Amino acid sequence: MPGADKETDLSERIESFLSELKRCGSGAGSLRGSAETARETSALLRRITAQARWSNAGELMEIIRKEGRRMTAAQPSETTVGNMVRRVLKIIREEYARSRGSSEETDQQESLHKLLTSGGSSEDNFRQHFAHLKANVIEAINELLTELEGTTDNISMQALEHIHSNEVIMTIGRSRTVEAFLKDAARKRKFHVIVAECAPFCQGHEMATSLSKEDIETTVIPDAAIFAVMSRVNKVIIGTQTVLANGGLRALNGTHTLALAAKHHSTPLIVCAPMFKLSPQFPNEEDTFHKFVSPHEVLPFTEGEILSKVNAHCPVFDYVPPELITLFISNIGGNAPSYIYRLMSELYHPEDHEL
Amino acid sequence: MEERELVEYFRTQIGEDPDVASAVAAIRSLLEFLKRDQSETILGLRENMTQAILRLQETDSSVAVSSGGELFLRFISLTSLEHPDLSQCKNVMIERGELFLKKISLSRGKVGKLCHTFIKDGAKILTHSSSRVVLKVLENAAADHKRFTVYVTESQPDSAGELMAQKLRKLNIPVTVVLDAAVGYIMEKVDLVIVGAEGVVESGGVINKIGTYQMAVCSKAHNKPFYVVAESFKFVRLYPLNQQDVPDRFKYKADVLKTAEDLNQEHPMIDYTPPSLITLLFTDLGVLTPSAVSDELIKLYL
């Protein structure tokens, strides 16, 4: 029966996505960038909307929430998956509100104003059926996908405003966004880049090779030299894995050191992060925060004698508090860290913060 | 309803339920006043209401009563804009007022639920004076089977900290009372600081029992997170730039204001903590950074 085929096909795709997520968690950084993860998640959600059985918005949201929970449980450190699920949930709410013809609020947040003026129960349980809801939601997800494809270009377009001639820029590790950003500026300006290698995975080396191919003068330094070199640096530009709800970052191991050194020398710290990296988590929630990988890189197994006497850890991420950050550059423009709460309220609905 | 009756009603509200926030009691009394009010026009109603709020502030001069009163006045203005006819307007007002009261009595629970996830197992918490909201947060955390210890400052001149310590002991939470002067001494031991607020001002700073500012400065110096828990009806339209800017009528108790000869000789009961020292605010509208507070106020008042 065609119906059953579609369903098994759908669940197969979901299962394969989940297992890929689980697998790619190990090792240096991710085997695929967060942009690809975001794109694949959105495409999968679009497929679920198209193929799963649902009759009203409430059911669709339940299905997506359930799948979203499974996906985030598969790889908690990959926050883009959860973010995309929340974006899609917000899209569904908006399309539902539009179909109902509520000329209402673009502002669905709780506010004092709403508390005072709402009369009666404003409980909306999304149970009404609308014929065009499916088509509308799929179209909106397509728009989301187009937006995702353009993010790196949108960020790189802003490069010329921030990088000037003969500047010394410092970065750490390897970020595809920062790479594109710097390459775009290099087309018109001459500047130097210092890359901190970011042990133990040393992705800084790949970054340096890639940048020097575009004729950018690049220097690689060990992490310990960050503070020493900082006095000669004009700007620090970094990427990040996640932007947290308070404006802080969850970035590569070693970024906090870089941020503190920059603060000490009053060097501006610019973070290039596309909007899909913005997550409604706060930095105190324990389980989803840290990820540790094999300490083999830190202390190889050949050092057997020492190994039995010490504990070795190899954390992957670092927390950078919002006070150390000067500017966020995203596909929608530049923003201060204190403004992140506003961007969050535009992207996600408060009830979706907990999937 | 006469002003004397209003004050009586307010006092009974507080007496009956000591756990109720003073702003909630004020709003309840004002709603009662509204129900019994005899004016014929909306303007008359507003004038009577303003007088009533002034009387209440004379009884209890805390910031919370002031913010509750202003909120209620705003509530009337917004409703009267939609229904210019008085009798219809009054019915709508009474209905919405009851609904509003019901919602805000739930705010403390919401705040408690939001905040307790930030308390980790084994945490040492420092708090100041006696706050019912902080108590609710700690209650929720204890119910979640988290183990933590609490340090409370004595909080002179009314020793409110002792009260807080008693309430915490009843919940089987290990608690130690410390001197107000010992805040700097104890700060290196604690993991986080949680305080309540009497009022949250437009800049995102808070007005709270005297000694809070000190605690905030110490926690900043030691790099410890400083959390404020407050319900949304405590947001008030003040923008103090320093301690002197906080109006005198909030700083001292109502009877002191009436009888004192020289206010400079009296001890202030509250101080202002600027937003730069606050890490996060937990409200029933969600977890807010201090910069988000003014957004909320603008949405309401403009």
Image: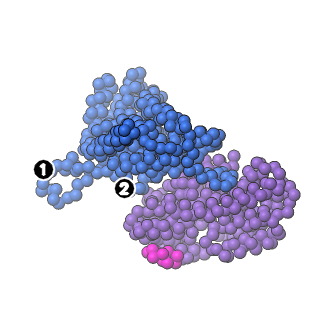
Q: Quarter-wise, where is residue A34 in the image? A: top left
Percent across and percent down for residue A140 are 50, 34
The residue carrying mark 2 is A287
Percent across and percent down for residue A331 are 47, 33
The residue positioned 77% from the left and 69% from the top of the image is B6
Percent across and percent down for residue A261 are 38, 45
Chain ID, blue in image: A
CB atoms of marks 1 and 2 within 8 Å: no
Q: Is residue B136 visible?
A: yes
Judging from the image, mark 1 belongs to the subunit labelled A
Is B150 situated left or right of B255 in this image?
A: left
The residue positioned 50% from the left and 44% from the top of the image is A55
Is B234 situated left or right of A71 in this image?
A: right
Judging from the image, what secondary structure is the residue with disc 1 in?
loop
**Residue type indicated by callout 2:** Asp
Q: Nearer the viewer, residue B228 or A17?
A: A17
The residue positioned 72% from the left and 54% from the top of the image is B74
In this picture the colour scheme is by chain
Of callouts 1 and 2, which one flags the residue occurring earlier in the amino acid sequence? 2
The residue carrying mark 1 is A302
Residue extent of the magenta highlight: B166-176
Q: Which of A142 and B79 is in front in this view?
A: A142
